Amino acid sequence: MMRGEVYVAIFAPRSGSEQHGRRPCIVVSRDAFTSHPAWGSVTVVPLTTSPRWLLPSPTSVQFSAGECGLAKASAALAHQITTLDRSKLGGAPIGRLSLEKDLALAKALRVYLDI
């Protein structure tokens, strides 16, 4: 498991406006943590196919269908960054971010976290 890989995860239980259900996500944790088998959690940014987020915003990154292994046009929601138990990420990664998308996601995270 490495930063920039796209996995399908189970986001449950969740509440309110949190992203929930089975959906793709992007690993954003440091490789030093995620590559260590004893480290039990992983920080991810969930993706959505909601039309509202397919439009550009400072805290989202848009992806076309087929890009990074995604079946549908999607958006990564930096403002929904969360940490999950790594058991919630199923199987092998479905894709990996390009350098351009990795930089765009890093920028969206900096905007959201004000760092």
Image (spheres, helix red, strand yellow):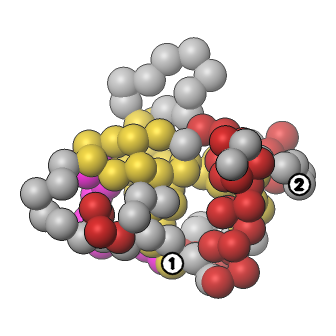
Farthest front residue in view: 115
* Overall secondary structure of the magenta section: strand
> At numbered mark 1, what does the secondary structure look like: helix, strand or loop?
strand
Q: CA distance from mark 2 to mark 1?
A: 21 Å
Q: Left of 45 or right of it: where is 57?
A: right
Q: Nearer the viewer, residue 15 or 33?
A: 33
Numbered range of the magenta stretch: 86-95
**Residue at left offset 57%, top offset 16%:** 16
The part of the image, by quadrant, that contains residue 80 is top right
Q: Is residue 50 magenta?
A: no
From where the camera sits, is residue 46 visible?
A: yes
- List the residue tagged with mark 1: 96
Give the amino acid type for the residue marked by disc 2 in the picture. Pro
**Residue at left offset 58%, top offset 69%:** 70
The part of the image, by quadrant, that contains residue 31 is bottom left
**Label 2 or label 1, whichever comes before in sequence order:** 2
- List the residue tagged with mark 2: 56
Q: Left of 87 or right of it: where is 72?
A: right
